[in-house]
Image: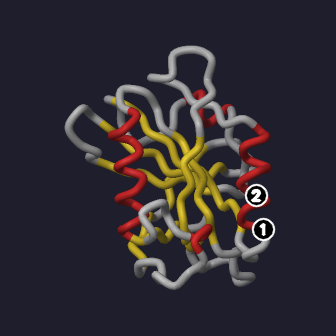
Amino acid sequence: MRAVSVPEPLVGEMRAHARATYPDECCGFLEAEPDPTDGGAPRSVVAVHRAANEYEGERRRRFVIRPEELRQAERLVQSSGRVIGGFYHSHPDHPARPSTFDQEHAWPWYSYLVLSVTAKDVPAIGAFELEPDSGVFREVPLLPAPAARSDAPANLRTPEGR
């Protein structure tokens, strides 16, 4: 299991996304540096990319990212040598923990950030990884990281240019 390192400006972008879509769930991609070979270093998130919640039912309790949108995001980051290292989504008026639905639809290796959001705030964010052998989510540390460099290529920054 790998800790996740996210710069505060990117945490702010995810929080803003969660507040903007409330009371529905938001979702998006975590763009990350390739994992170091030593296995002990945290996954380093360098950008977040919003995704469309394409769930065809009650979006207040579920999200779906279409496979085509995931492939497009992977192509976007591929030229930079980075990867889609995971996903984030919000839980309106619920804890920052994966649901049974989340667990049943998750893939090993990826990092998952879950944001608890209310009408007024985003009080908590949890980081998780699916254990490959058991298929159970395990909480991992969510670590602060230095802000992304402002001279990074535009496709590697958040929409606000961070």
Element type at mark 1 = helix
Note whether 14 is above or below 55 in the view shown: below
What amino acid is found at the position of numbered circle 2 in the picture? Glu
Tell me the residue at 63%/28% (across/down). 54
* Residue depicted at 60% across the width and 28% down the height: 101
Name the secondary structure under disc 2.
Answer: helix
Residue 31 seen in the current view: yes
Residue 33, position as x, y percentages in the image: 65, 75
Give the quarter of the figure containing the N terminus: bottom right
Q: Residue at x 53, y 48 (%)?
A: 88
Bin the neighbour count of mark 2 within 10 Å (Cα to Cα): few under 14, some 14-19, many 20 and up.
some
Query: Where is residue 7, by image quadrant?
Result: bottom left
The disc placed on residue 74 is 2
Of the residues shown, which amino acid type is indicated by label 1? Gln
Marks 2/1: CA–CA distance:
6 Å
Q: Which residue is painted at 50% across and 22% down in the image?
A: 59
Report the front residue among 133 and 39: 39
Q: Position of residue 115 (x, y in %)?
A: 40, 45
Q: Which mark is residue 78?
A: 1
Label pair 2/1, CB-CB below 8 angstroms: yes
